[in-house]
Image: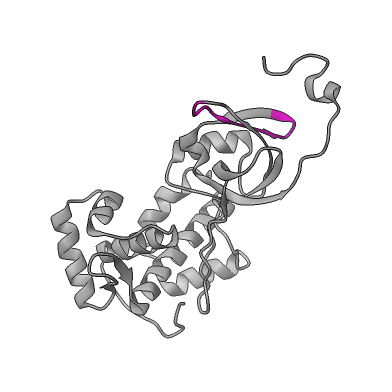
Amino acid sequence: MLGSRFVMTISRASEDYLKAVYACTASGLPVTTGGLAQELGVSSPSVTAMVKRLSAEQFLERSDGRTLRLTERGERAALRVVRRHRLVEAFLAAVLELGWDEVHAEAELLEHTLSDRLADRIDAYLGHPTHDPHGDPIPPRTGHHEESWGEPLAAAPADCRFRVERVSDRDSAALRYLGGLGVVPGAVLEVQEQAPFGGPRWFRIGGERHALGGPIIRLIHGRIVGRPPQRSTAALTGGRQEDR
């Protein structure tokens, strides 16, 4: 929850740590000093020192002696930077027409310098968007925020229709590839078979059949919305055996 009167100036490094803890927690991952070191690409001693500082400032606490979690104060601070980041992404995509594979890196820089007042102006200018270009929900200025990832495409059964709702923004090359296929938030995929022995997952979109391997398919989340329309054998194969 973002408090309407919550005003605090904290360092860029502190914001990065709090955002990382929030992201890991929202993904259902336990947060440890070792995990944070890997997430942020810094040394374990650096993480230990920052965790000690953030704990002293009542942004972090340990739930079981080892696992870290945000305090209410820490969650408010994390949500402020998450809100700024996602609003910047939405602005860059909608107004400056940057690609969805470009906006994350720019937002990583701008999220630390944007004031809450300017973030609110961007929010109003865009018509109060609820999600950024990757489908990540934008925290409101005040009130409850729900951070839901939905179902992973990797776990969807064959012969279902799957609506893409959220795609991880960590890999810009993967985003470019998925965007070229049309696999973006709002797209509906007809999920087909999984190739054996760890092979790719097949799906159909826009009348074309494609395959996605394990690393990239794990970036995609959404929900099952039904079964694909029935096609005749001729329609499916064009009078021949397809994809042989």
Residue farthest toward the bottom in the current orientation of the protein: 5
- Left or right of residue 218, residue 231 in this image: right
Q: Nearer the viewer, residue 218 or 18?
A: 218
Q: Nearer the viewer, residue 60 or 198?
A: 198
The quadrant in which residue 242 appears is: top right
Q: Where residue 42 appears, x then y in whole percent? A: 21, 51
Q: Is residue 15 visible?
A: yes
Q: Nearer the viewer, residue 146 or 77?
A: 146
Say which residue appears at 79% left-offset and 25% top-offset: 236
Say which residue appears at 77% left-offset and 40% top-offset: 228
Q: Where residue 162 appears, x then y in whole percent? A: 67, 46
User: Which segment is the magenta one?
Assistant: 197-208
Q: Where residue 129 appears, x then y in whole percent? A: 60, 64
Q: Is residue 112 visible?
A: no
The quadrant in which residue 115 appears is: bottom left
206 over 142 or under it: above or below: above
142 over 146 or under it: above or below: below
Task: Count the numbered circles shown.
Answer: 0
Q: Where residue 47 appears, x then y in whole percent? A: 19, 59
- Left or right of residue 188, residue 222 in this image: left
Residue farthest toward the front in the current orientation of the protein: 197
Q: Is 68 contained in the magenta span?
A: no
Q: Quadrant of the C terminus?
A: top right
